[in-house]
Amino acid sequence: MEKIFHLWVYLETTPLLGLGITLVVWQVAVSLSSRLGNGPLANPMLLSVVILSSLLLGTGTPYSAYFQGAQYVHFLLGPATVALALPMYSNLSRIRRSARAIVPALMAGSLVAALSAMVLANLFGASHVVVMSLAPKSVTTPIAMGIAEQIGGQPSLAAVFVLITGLTAIMLIPTTMKLLRIRDMRAQGLAAGVAGHGLATARMLLVSETAGAFGGLAIGLNGVVTAILVPLLATFFAP
């Protein structure tokens, strides 16, 4: 145990800690998820967050020390998002045929995602900063942070809400689709992209390339619509 302790103290001072522990925890989470039947609550992303948070808190490791190595994984989020263009290109003909249904569904989804969050937060007595930070929760982190800063929210708080929204969407979307008997992969992918941005879309991509393609499309379009829509809605929630 003493040797392990000294090794951990050494790794805290190098980027190896964040990079290594992220990769190991992910593999452990994937293995656990498989053994638990890949259920909504046994999603590898959720398990990874829980395990990593517990490790950092239990060992007293500062997040800044962890992120020295985790930043390399974080950097890959950009290329991974761009890579969603590949399934979109493969399903281009389906996207074109569905364009008339995509536009109203996307507009309705963007409006409900933002407005419902703002109304509920306001009804429960949340501060103006929290309401504004919660509004762009269903878009990717960089866009959400930019929107939140523009309308009087807190960018770092918006980033937390984005993560929570994505994890919640991962858990709820499969069950919701079954309950509503929605079997069309196009509809499932579009819903995942609008409600749960990249995290939910990545999960749907494991299920169906078509769902991943429509999810990727929804991420981009929802970001544009939300960037226009939320500042307009924010005027109705002035302090």
Image: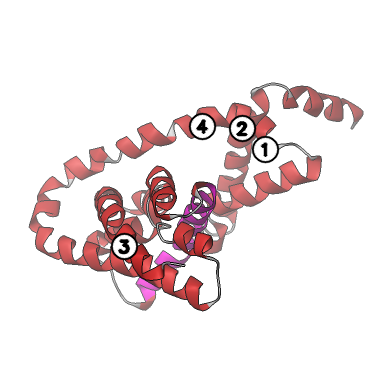
Neighbour class for label 2 at 10 Å: few (<14), some, many (≥20)? Answer: some
Q: Secondary structure at mark 2?
A: helix
For the residues labelled 4 and 3, the Cα–Cα distance comes to 27 Å
Q: Is residue 154 above or below residue 14?
A: below
Distance from label 4 to label 2 (Cα)?
9 Å
Residue pictured at 75% horizontal, 37% vertical: 61
Classify 10 Å Cα crowding around label 4: few (below 14), some (14-19), many (20 and above): few
Type of secondary structure dominating the magenta stretch = helix
Q: Is residue 1 left or right of residue 68?
A: right
Q: Secondary structure at mark 3?
A: helix
Closer to the chain start, of discs 2 and 3, is 2
**Nearer the camera: disc 2 or disc 3:** 2
Is 40 left, or right, of 140 in this rendering?
right
SS of the residue under disc 1: helix
Q: Which mark is residue 63?
A: 1
Q: Secondary structure at mark 4?
A: helix
Q: What range is drawn magenta here?
A: 156-178
Closer to the chain start, of discs 4 and 3, is 4
> Disc 1 to disc 2, how far (Cα)?
6 Å
**Eye-nearest disc, 4 or 1:** 1
Label ID, residue 73? 4
Label 1–label 2 contact, CB within 8 A: yes
Q: Earlier in the sequence, mark 4 or mark 1?
A: 1
| Nearest to the observer: residue 40 or residue 14 | 14
Are dots 4 and 1 in contact, CB under 8 Å? Answer: no
| Numbered tag placed on residue 191 in the rendering | 3
Let me know if residue 175 appears in the view: no
- Which quadrant: the N terminus? top right
Labelled disc at residue 67: 2
